[in-house]
Amino acid sequence: MHVSSTIKRITLALLVIALVAALLVYGVGLDVIKARQVDLLYLGKQHLWLVGWSMLFALLVGIPSGFSQPPLRPPLGGIHYADL
């Protein structure tokens, strides 16, 4: 039953991606996409490169910062693991 819900979610996500891509092609026009294919590929590559570096630096700063800070409030129920 768990696999079935996972397959449904994946199928729905793929359908949404296909719908967005179809609307983009319809709105912009296939001729414009073909005419600007080189630019779109170059800019897409640059975008992914910048996103990758941004994610790397965010993780390099965020993960150590999160581990070095004490929790701001006790967990629900007020039980501290140090008290056990």
Image (cartoon, rainbow, N blue to C red):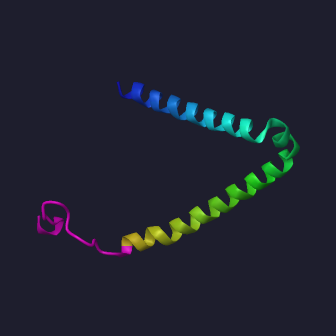
Between 46 and 22, the residue placed more toward the observer is 22
Splitting the image into 4 quarters, where does residue 71 fall? bottom left
Residue 13 coordinates in the image, percent (x, y): 53, 35
Residue 23 lies, in percent from the top left, at 67, 36
- Relative to 42, is 73 above or below? below
Q: Which quadrant holds the N terminus?
A: top left
- 26 is within the stretch colored magenta: no
- Residue at (57% x, 68% y) in the render: 57
Q: Which of 26 and 73 is in front in this view?
A: 26
Q: Magenta stretch: give its range.
A: 68-84
- Position of 71 with respect to 61 (left or right) is left
Q: Name the side, left or right, on which 35 lies relative to 47.
A: right
How many labels, in total? 0
Horizontal side, residue 51 vs residue 76: left or right: right
Q: Which residue is drawn at 74% across and 53% down?
A: 45
Name the residue at 13% across, 60% down. 77
Residue 41 screen position, x and y as percent: 79, 49
Residue 74 colored in magenta in the image: yes
Task: State which quadrant residue 30 falls in.
Answer: top right
Magenta: main secondary structure equals loop
Identify which residue is drawn at 60% across, 37% down. 17
Question: Can you name the residue that lies furthest to the right here?
Answer: 35
Quadrant including the C terminus = bottom left
Looking at the picture, tell me which residue is in the foreground, 3 or 41: 41
Is 41 located above or below residue 59 in the figure? above
